[in-house]
Image (cartoon, helix red, strand yellow):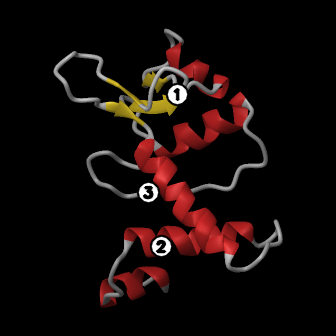
Amino acid sequence: MVGRETGWARFRVCLDTKEETIRGAVAGETAEEACIFTDENRSYLWLESEEESRSRKAVDHSEGWADDRDEDGIREVHVNTIEGIWTSLRNRLRRFRGVHKDRLSGYVAMFELAFNHDQITPALLQRMCGM
């Protein structure tokens, strides 16, 4: 997930893409009133229920890469940001010629750290050490 306003990314290794798994990951990382931009994957249908406080805007890739919902000429509904970041992660892992699934979450955590912190600062080191 990537915050559209902050630009910060959160990554989780999930065992599957079932609705229950995705719901737990999204609900644990987003605010109650968040608007979630997704593709047409059925695992996100729960975001459209009336009981859910989060909202969803989905892009149907068979119709185009993005949607201009308010017809102002700007395609504001897209998932290109997260798709590009996942491509970067895949390319970083590719150099290892395979990663054991038991260690995948560690590699993903290191990628998240590098993505969110472009400089190593004393404050970052303190947070990493739990100080």
Which residue sits at x=40%, y=38%? 31
Pinpoint residue 65: horizontal percent, then vertical percent: 44, 32
Q: Amino acid at mark 1?
A: His
The residue tagged 3 is 9
Which residue sits at x=62%, y=55%? 12
The furthest residue to the bottom: 122
For the residues marked 1 and 3, what is the alpha-carbon distance in whole angstroms? 22 Å
The residue tagged 1 is 61
Query: On the rendered structure, is 20 left or right of 3?
Result: right
For the residues marked 3 and 2, what is the alpha-carbon distance in whole angstroms? 9 Å
Label 1, secondary structure: give it: loop
| Viewport quadrant of the C terminus | bottom left
The residue tagged 2 is 113
Label 2, secondary structure: give it: helix
Pinpoint residue 67: horizontal percent, then vertical percent: 36, 23
Which residue sits at x=60%, y=43%? 25
| Residue 27's disc number | none
Q: Give the label, 1 or 3, closer to the camera.
A: 1
Q: Amino acid at mark 3?
A: Ala
Examine the rendered structure and indicate whether residue 126 appears above or below residue 40. below
Q: Amino acid at mark 2?
A: Leu
Which residue sits at x=44%, y=39%? 79
